[in-house]
Each structure stands twice: as C-alpha cells, then as structure tokens.
C-alpha cells in the first residue's frame, strides 16, 4: 500500500551490497540498510568483510536483518546471495547496489590492471547482482533497484577510472530502467557528493581536507552516509512509484559551485 506520509516497507525484502562499514561508522550502504529496516523491511546486508556486515545487523533492533559474507565480483557469489535471500525470506523486492572503490590519476598514470579492477568492482558487481536479483524481484511482483554512482561521473576531478566507472553506472541504470519497466521494476541512480563515510576517514583524511570538502558545498555543510541512505530510501519506496531511470544528485550543491557572482 502506498503511504502518502511516510516510507512504509513492511513485508518487503532488501539486499544491500557493501552494507557493512568500518567500526560503528555510517557508510552509505549501512545507512540505507538501517533506514530500510526502520521503515519495516527485512534486510540482507552483504559485505566481503563479514564483521562489517554483522556490525550493521547488530545496529538493527527488529531482528529482521541478516549478514552475508561475499566478494560480489564473483558471479556464483551473487547468484548464491539471491538464492540465500529467497530461502530465508521467500521473496526479494529491493536491491541497493552500493559497492564501489576509488581510484587516482589520469589515463596516462593509471595502471591497466587497476583500471580493470575499478570497472569490475564499480560496474560489473552491479551487473552481476542485478542479473540474479531481477528475476526474483519480478517473481515477487516487481520492486526497485538503486545503483550508487558519484558526482565524479558528471564533474570529473582527477579520479579518471572512478569517473568513467560511475558514468557507466548511470548508463546501466537507465538501460535497466528501460529493459525492466514492464517487469514492474524501477531502476534509479544516486550520485553522492563528498560525504564523510568510513571509506573516507579510514584513509586518514586530515582536518584541513575535511574542511575543504565541507566548503565545496553551496550549503557549506558536510554530507553524511545518512544523506545518501535517505535518498535510497525515497527511491525504493512507493513515494517514488512514478520515478525511474533517474539520477538523483545528493551533494549539497557541489556540482553547481563555480566562481562567485561578483568575480564573473
Ligand atoms: N564516501 C563518499 O564520499 C562517496 C562519494 C560518492 C560516491 N560514493 C559511493 O558510495 C558507495 C559506498 O561508499 P562508502 O563511502 O559508504 O564506502 P565504504 O567503504 O564505507 O563501504 C563500502 C563497503 O563495501 C565493501 N566492499 C567493497 N568491495 C566489495 C566487494 N567486492 N564485495 C563485497 N563488499 C565489498 C567494503 O568492505 C565496505 O564495507 C560506493 O559506491 C562509493 O563509490 C561515496
């Protein structure tokens, strides 16, 4: 049932890839998993680091979360994650394709093997998880997929393999939206800006770098995993039932930032 005044996911089953996070930090996947669980969904938290996935499940009060370990660059792992979800919960409604890794440098500097690895983790994992999840979502009467891209796709800044991979995620989302609309499946994309997640501070970001990131927003505020999680929650809910094939930028206006008015 569509609830006009909230995000109601009772009876729904969701998979979140990369739903773990370092320690008790709030990554984009962990935030989405917790928000969907709070909205009533049962949530399968997948991470190649099982302790991270288990930490996310431990933050859930309802007992509706389970943690699964797996490196989702492997096709068999993705197929098994969907099978295990169906065995445990009997249906699948939602997939949050959240796994992603960064890169550094331009095409001249980039190592060819590293390029392949970035494409594999950032794009192929979304293809593989969707390949096995879509038939299950269709059998459950339709549902929703969100693929996590980045503003690096539309405003590149020296992370060229990453930018190219996240651009592919936008195209993949649009193509999937077209291909599977008649299966009752909506597919959208979220483009986070520089949000402060364990991925970022786990690399030892300095206070100065953190402040530069904050100031890059028109709003002059720092984005968090919750901002991305809330966007995912909206897109997977019935509140977005007329929204498919879209890219939702969640960046505090970073991509609109340019020279100040009086300097133009
Ligand atoms: N943090 C940012 O500023 C930012 C900005 C734009 C986009 N994003 C995107 O948001 C998504 C999540 O980012 P985050 O900052 O929350 O990351 P994170 O590193 O905190 O969480 C991602 C999780 O994915 C897991 N993971 C990585 N590779 C995996 C694999 N092959 N199989 C299974 N699990 C795997 C990691 O163990 C980790 O726990 C990524 O796609 C990232 O590119 C992040």
Image (tube, rainbow, N blue to C red):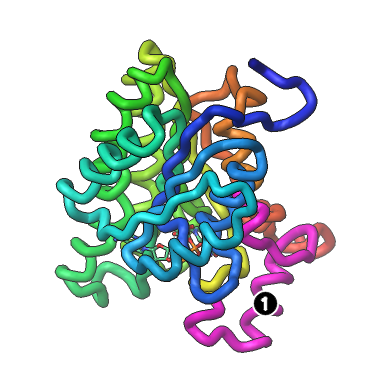
What is the secondary structure assignment of the residue under circle 1?
helix
> Residue, x 59% and y 71% (percent of image)?
25
| Depth order, front residue of 104/6 | 6
Above or below 62: residue 112: below
Residue 98 seen anywhere in this rendered image of the structure: no
> Looking at the rendering, which quadrant does residue 184 occupy?
top left
Viewport quadrant of the N terminus: top right
> Residue, x 73% and y 71% (percent of image)?
215
**Highlighted range, magenta:** 201-229
> Looking at the rendering, which quadrant does residue 172 occupy?
top left
Return the x and y of residue 198 as percentages of the image width and height.
Answer: 54, 73
Q: Residues within 10 Å of mark 1 (few under 14, many from 20)?
A: few
169 to the left or right of 112:
right
Above or below 73: residue 87: above
> Residue, x 46% and y 56% (percent of image)?
19
Viewport quadrant of the C terminus: bottom right
Ligand 1 location (quadrant): bottom left
171 to the left or right of 226:
left
> Residue, x 55% and y 28% (percent of image)?
11
Return the x and y of residue 57 as percentages of the image width and height.
Answer: 52, 57
127 to the left or right of 11:
left
Residue 22 seen anywhere in this rendered image of the structure: yes
Quick one: which residue is furthest to the right in this view?
A: 262
Q: How many marks?
A: 1
Which residue carries the number 1 mark?
A: 212
- Is residue 237 located in the magenta-colored stretch of the structure? no
- Is residue 208 located in the magenta-colored stretch of the structure? yes
């Amino acid at each position: 049932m569509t609830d006009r005044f909230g995000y109601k996911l009772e009876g729904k089953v969701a998979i979140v890839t990369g739903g773990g996070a370092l320690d008790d930090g709030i990554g984009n996947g962990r935030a989405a998993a917790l928000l969907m669980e709070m909205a009533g969904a049962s949530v399968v938290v997948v991470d190649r680091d099982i302790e991270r996935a288990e930490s996310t499940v431990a933050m859930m009060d309802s007992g509706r979360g389970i943690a699964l370990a797996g490196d989702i660059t492997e096709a068999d792992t993705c197929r098994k994650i969907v099978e295990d979800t169906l065995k445990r919960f009997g249906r699948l409604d939602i997939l949050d394709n959240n796994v992603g890794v960064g890169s550094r440098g331009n095409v001249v500097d980039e190592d060819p093997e590293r390029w392949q690895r970035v494409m594999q983790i950032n794009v192929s994992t979304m293809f593989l998880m969707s390949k096995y999840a879509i038939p299950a979502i269709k059998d459950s009467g339709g549902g929703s997929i969100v693929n996590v891209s980045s503003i690096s796709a539309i405003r590149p800044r020296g992370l060229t393999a990453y930018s190219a991979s996240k651009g592919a995620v936008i195209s993949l989302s649009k193509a999937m939206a077209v291909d599977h609309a008649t299966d009752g499946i909506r597919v959208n994309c979220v483009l986070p800006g520089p949000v402060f997640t364990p991925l970022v501070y786990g690399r030892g970001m300095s206070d100065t770098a953190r402040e530069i990131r904050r100031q890059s927003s028109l709003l002059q505020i720092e984005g968090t995993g919750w901002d991305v999680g809330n966007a995912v929650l909206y897109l997977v809910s019935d509140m977005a039932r007329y929204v498919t094939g879209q890219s939702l930028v969640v960046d505090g206006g970073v991509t609109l930032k340019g020279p100040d008015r009086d300097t133009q």
